[in-house]
Amino acid sequence: METDTPTKPMAIDPQIEPSWKKALAHEFTQDYFAKLKAFLLNEKQAGHQVYPPGKEIFNAFALTPFDKVKVVILGQDPYHGPNQAHGLAFSVKDGVRPPPSLKNIYKELQSDLGLTPPAHGNLEKWAKQGVFLLNTSLTVRAAEANSHRKQGWEVFTDAVIRTLSREREHVVFILWGSPAQSKRTLINANKHLILTSVHPSPLSANRGFFGCKHFSKTNAYLAETGQTPIDWQL
């Protein structure tokens, strides 16, 4: 990624869908975003492997246009293993075994809606229906969880959540775990549905994730507000 001076508008990644470019135009010209680009360039120059690949960093934005978002599922940082992360929270590429948290999501889907868990972990079908799978940090160094925290991504993704809350109506925000739940102050609960539970990680899923019925609750709300429910079957 080429660097820009902090006062110069940056070139927006071509993978960012046009409606997102318009909605977030202000963010791409801010000092923090230029510094974030410089940080990612330094990571590359230092020889660090960064996930997901550059062309997939904004995959969630490419697959779910701003004006098509119905549901936001908020994750933390991308998976940090080889060939896992591809820009969608909780999702992994085809051919990669679903990680434990995603397996628990599938278990809850089966319990809630009777859906058969798939053998793969690719959630692109959800994204294309309006499920915006957003991580609070969009990149990570290989084998080092949370290694790109506090480099600017959180400022950007907070702005994404605020913009969705302000500009859209009747979006379902699904917040699993304390870090995700800390974002609820960015969301106007008077015009959106906020669903919270513990994280689907094996460390916490038995303390309230299983049985939360967030998928059926989401579809009920979408139907009540005149929107097409999500086909959660993968």
Image (spheres, rainbow, N blue to C red):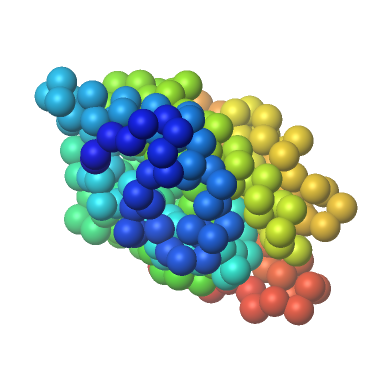
Residue sitting at 29 percent across and 22 percent down?
Answer: 144
Viewed as shown, does residue 225 lie left or right of 32? right
Residue sitting at 60 percent across and 38 percent down?
Answer: 158
Please determine whether, in this image, residue 119 is positioned above or below residue 211.
below
Along the viewing direction, whichever of 124 and 35 lies nearer the viewer = 35
Q: Quadrant of the N terminus?
A: top left
Q: Residue furthest right?
A: 190
Please determine whether, in this image, residue 188 is positioned above or below residue 49.
below
Numbered circles on residues, count: 0
Viewed as shown, does residue 180 lie left or right of 45? right
Residue sitting at 28 percent across and 34 percent down?
Answer: 3
Please determine whether, in this image, residue 181 is positioned above or below residue 148.
below
Along the viewing direction, whichever of 208 and 54 lies nearer the viewer = 54
Q: Residue 136: percent from the left, percent from the top?
A: 50, 37
Q: Residue 212: percent from the left, percent from the top?
A: 68, 47
Along the viewing direction, whichever of 161 and 18 lies nearer the viewer = 18
Whether residue 44 is visible to the viewer of this picture, yes or no, is yes
Q: Residue 145: percent from the left, percent from the top?
A: 35, 24
Residue sitting at 23 percent across and 45 percent down?
Answer: 53
Q: Quadrant of the C terminus?
A: bottom left
Along the viewing direction, whichever of 221 and 171 lies nearer the viewer = 171
Q: Residue 182: percent from the left, percent from the top?
A: 68, 30
Whether residue 176 is visible to the viewer of this picture, yes or no, is no
